Amino acid sequence: MSGFMYGMMIQWKMDIRSRSILVTCYIVPLIFFLLMGGIFVSVMPEMKKTLIQSMAVMSVSMGAFIGMPPSILETYGGDVKKLYKANNVPLYVSLITMVVSTFVHLVIMCGLIVLLAPGLFGAELPKNLPIFFAGLGIFLITSLAVGSVLGLLVKNQANLTMIAQIVFLPSIMLSGIMFPQNMLPEVLQKVGEAFPAFWGYRLMSDGGMVPENIFYLAILFCVSGVFCLLLLKKKKSD
């Protein structure tokens, strides 16, 4: 427990100085929300029913795939890793603290969207907010698990940026949050289903908390967790 608290202390200090966390978890999602929210409901008034879910998917995907992985790469590829070893803190503690920290930041951002969207754009609140936040939590932890794999697997910042964009952009374009998914060719619809955003969007929608929408996210979380354990074991031996 003392090792975990030490890791959390280090992580919060790093977050305070991290421009990446500020930009990807708050500034960019908030700007996107403020600019695109009005456009979406003007062009497609029916999006008032799903605007909150759409913006939550965008915020989570941005933070999990673009914001967190560079921090993981920096930690496990630099002096912070040596600091953990010198203080006999298990390497997995750093990953857990980053996941917990990013989780909290993104929940705060999504909470702001829930609070602001009805007043700014006339968006409809989810009918059952506890169920909505439960779905958000499942989607969030799955996306962060995938982001953790990216941060642990890729060893070069330039490559990580490229791969993160490859995961992020289809998550936004093919998930159905920008326009109805049935407008896409069938092959792109199938590609979109491979990304957690597709299922997270449906999970957070009214009536979407069903086993069908949870199953793929649960499998993806378990697979990502196994990969993280293997990659951490490899880094421990490096």
Image (cartoon, helix red, strand yellow):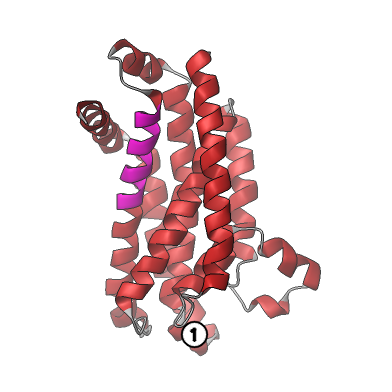
Amino acid type for the residue under numbered disc 1: Ser
| Residue 177 shows up from this direction | no
Badge 1: residue crowd in 10 Å (few <14, some 14–19, many ≥20): few
* In the foreground, 218 or 64: 218
* Badge count: 1
Q: Residue at x 58, y 38 (%)?
A: 161
| Residue 155 shows up from this direction | yes
Residue designated by label 1: 42
Q: Is residue 86 above or below residue 160?
A: above
Query: Whole-percent x and y of residue 167?
Result: 62, 50
Q: Is residue 106 magenta?
A: no
The kind of secondary structure element at disc 1 is helix
Residue at far bottom of view: 45
Q: Is residue 55 above or below residue 224?
A: below
Q: Is residue 94 magenta?
A: yes
Classify residue 183 by image quadrant.
bottom right
Q: Residue at x 42, y 67 (%)?
A: 135
**Which stretch did the figure color magenta?**
92-104
Q: Specify the quadrant that holds the N terminus.
A: top left
Q: Is residue 52 above or below residue 173?
A: below
Left or right: 103 in relation to 208:
left
Q: Is residue 194 above or below residue 226?
A: below
Q: Residue at x 34, y 30 (%)?
A: 93
Query: Whole-percent x and y of residue 208?
Result: 49, 77
Classify residue 74 by image quadrant.
top left
Left or right: 88 in relation to 23:
left
Q: Main secondary structure of the magenta part?
A: helix
Residue at far top of view: 86
Query: Whole-percent x and y of residue 85?
Result: 35, 14
